[in-house]
Structures are given as structure tokens and as C-alpha cells.
Amino acid sequence: MAHNQEWLDRQERTRWFLQDRFGMFIHWGLYAIPARGEWVRNVERTSVEEYQAYFDEFDPVDYDPRAWARAARQAGMKYAVLTAKHHDGFCLFDSKLTDYKSTKTKAGRDLVAEFLEAFRAEGLKVGLYYSLIDWHHEDFPAHGDLYHPMRDNEAYKRDPSTFGSYLDYMHGQVRELLTNYGKLDLMWFDFSYDVMQGEKWRASELIAMMRALQPHIVIDNRLEAGGEGGGSIYTKAPLAYAGDFASPEQIIPPSGVTDEDGQPIPWEACVTLNNNWGYVASDTNYKSPAIVIRKLVECVSKNGNLLLNVGPDARGRIPKQSLDILAEVGDWMALNGDSIYGCGQAELPKPDWGRYTQKGNTLYAHVFEESVGAINLAGLAGRIKRARLLADGSELPVTRPWNAALFEADAFFNFATPVHYTYPLPDAR
Ligand code: FHN
């Protein structure tokens, strides 16, 4: 199929994204103080004055982004995305367009600048999340349940024509981030909805400005797409506004994501480690390392990425439960990362005992169902040159059926580690 220049440009931009496959999402801001999630201001109808108390108090004395970056690197993550501004409008960077920013709190620090420096130093690609919605800016309208505390104040008299001033502010801040903070690899906008999408954000103008400042930057699809669940993959054209990847949330698409021509497109599932994006002290419902690994394998087996979230607390610490899970995932990735990085959907259909990923002419078998009987490779025997267990390099028989018990279950995850085969593909990739 012939491809247009836009398709070719996207292929070039996303080359690193498709290689890296696994990233860290970081939701952090004033909402870490109430510790009831990043939507606390909306859900609890917090007044401007009440929320201002959090601004006056914010001072993350334990913020050590280099430690965050080491945890991400050791988990096998290759990129990271930090909330530069979430829906509450609080800026973790030294914007010249507002005083509602971290450098005006007791912290007195540009938290974004420190994040970028630390993660680059640990060799990770860096991205920023930027909320299109802004409950603090007086010219952002309240729609439906997008409660806007400024709008609910008696004194607030908004002239509908002033929404343009919010867009000028939003575009101005994106310009600041792409001008004052060095090379950014990724921009994660969030989120569009029925009355606000595409040109309502002046998306074409915004994208043109971004491409002029940082032509290589990878951009998600939420200048057009919604958030929650599949909202970002069932739009008419998942990448309508020059987005480079679709962004399913908390779900993994049944069979990857394709564009309106049925062509596979880059996508990334963003998933929380417990049930919340922002820090919630009481939320101890964490996913096990095994579940995280299976989600990562499933994403890659369908040509996708996994962006796994952590929510640091008000002192600036990633919760210990999160760190422990990331460390165990990292142990597995250290031995099996070859079956993830640069891999994608296999030529073969999904086997009943697990999933395949593939890179070039190397097939990786992720054996999840140890209960299954012998894994019969007879159908492949003629096409497999050799089989090895990734975890220890040991040879696996190719000619006779294997019994799942052959695969040493990894003590951490209680399921077998993947093996790789090498077999000639009908057409070299
Ligand atoms: O409303 C946000 C939510 O707080 C969080 O940032 C997620 C993460 O992708 N995005 C939106 C919900 O879809």
C-alpha cells in the first residue's frame, strides 16, 4: 500500500516509541496532599479557597527525581511522562504565564526541569502530560460535570467570548514547554470530549507550532480523542489531529488499533498500578508483578506499548508498594527484555497456552498457562532452527512436544519465562 508523507513522517517519529515499548506515567501535583485522587477538586466540589490551602502548603521535601529515574530504568522502562499540568491547572514548571506554579510554592522548584534532567541522565526518553482542561483558569468554561470552581464563585462573571484567552494561555504554555526545556520526546495531551475537540482547541495551529519547534516530537491523539477506556480508539479516525499514537486507557484493545484504512497504527495503553492515577493513601489494591508482565506482553503481542503509572505522595516519594512491584518487573525484564523491546505481533495466531511476540525472524513464546499439557510444536518443527529458554539460555527440545512443566516457573511470577525460537520466515522481514 502506498503511503503518504504524513504516514512516512509518523513512522520516522515513532521509531523509538515502537522500540521502547514500556514507559512510566507519573501523576503528581497538589492533589497528592488530600490524597484522594487527582479529580478530588471536581468530585468533592472543592472551593477555590479550600484548594488554595494545598498550594500554600505544597513542599515535597523528599522529591528526588533521580531516584524515580533509577526505579524506572531498573524496571526496564525506556521512557517516562510526567504531568506538567493536570486538570486543576497547577503547573509543575516555571511558566511565565501564571503564578499558579511550583516555583511560587514553598518548594520554590521547577519540578519539570528537575524531572527532565534526571530521567535524561538515566538514559530514558522524556515526555510531558499537559491537561487541555483547566479548572483554575478563569476563562476555561465549565461543561457538564467538568465542575469549574472559578465559575461557581458569586463574583465570577464570565464573558463567553473570553474562552479564546484560555486558548492563548494554553498554546503559550505549550510553547514554553517546547522552547525552554530542551528536547522533548513526547507530548501527552488530555483530553477531548463532545463539545471540546479538534479545532475547538485550535489543534491545527497548536500542532503546527509544535512541529516547527520540535519536529521529532511524538504526540498522542487526545486533541481529538476522549479519555477513559476505549474513548481514544473508537473515534472516527484515531489519529485525526496529527496524533502519532492512540491512547486506550485502563484497557488493552482486543486486537491492536488500526486506522480508517485498516492499517495498524502505534498505540499505548496507559494503566494504573493500583486503582488511581494520583496518590491515594487508602488504595492498596495493587496489581501483582505477574499481572503487570502479562499486560506488557499482551500489549506488545498486539503491536502496542504499556505506559504504567505511579502516583508519588505529597513528600515526593513513589509509594513503596509501587517500587517493589517495579523492582520485580525489572528482574524479569533483565532476563526477558529481548522478547519485548522492538517486538510486535507475531506471524502466528495466538496459542492457547500464552502469547507470542516477534522481532524479525525470532519468535518469542510467553508460556502463561502451566496447567496446559504438552506444548506440541510438531506443526512448527520444520521451521524452527533452535529453541532456548531466555531466562538461562538453556536449550529446549524442538522435535518432540514439550510439557509446560519443562519451563522453569520463575519464582516471582509463578509462570514460565518466555523462550525464543528462530525459524526462517517465508519472506525475510
Ligand atoms: O481525567 C484524566 C485522569 O485524571 C488521568 O489523567 C487519565 C490518564 O490518562 N486521563 C484522564 C481520564 O481519561
Image: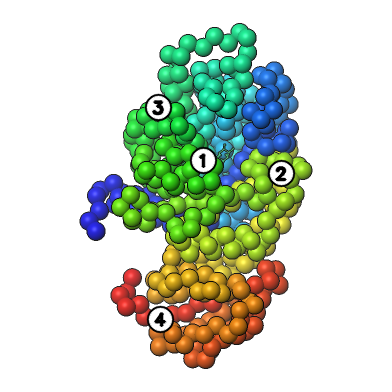
Residue 191 x/y as whole percent:
49, 36
| Left or right relative to 257: residue 137 | right
Of 425 and 42, nearer the camera is: 42
Q: Amino acid at mark 3?
A: Lys
Residue type highlighted by circle 2: Arg
- Provide the secondary structure element on which disc 4 rests: loop
- Left or right, residue 78 beside residue 30: left
Question: What is the quadrant of the N terminus in the image?
Answer: bottom left
- Residue count near mark 4 (Cα–Cα under 10 Å), binned few <14, some 14–19, many ≥20: some
Q: Are marks 4 and 2 in contact (CB under 8 Å)?
A: no
| 144 sits left or right of 224 in the view | right
Label 1 packing within 10 angstroms: few (<14), some (14-19), many (20+): some
The quadrant where residue 178 appears: top left
N-term mark: 4 or 3: 3
Say which mark, if any, is on residue 227.
1
Q: Circle 2 sits on which residue?
A: 317
Amino acid residing under circle 1: Gly
Q: Earlier in the sequence, mark 4 or mark 2?
A: 2
Q: Closer to the N terminus: mark 3 or mark 1? A: 3
Q: Earlier in the sequence, mark 2 or mark 3?
A: 3
- Per the rendering, the mark at residue 200 is 3
Q: Residue under circle 4?
A: 423
| Closer mark to the observer between disc 1 and disc 2 | 1
**Callout 3 environment at 10 Å: few (<14), some (14 to 19), or many (20+)?**
some
Disc 1 element = loop
Residue at the spot 68% in from the left edge and 71% down from the top edge: 414
Question: Is label 1 within 8 A of ligand 1 (CB to nearest ligand atom)?
Answer: yes
Q: Could you classify mark 2 by the number of other residues whose Cα lies within 10 Å: few (under 14), some (14-19), or many (20 or more)?
A: some
- Residue 205: where, in percent of width, then height? 34, 30
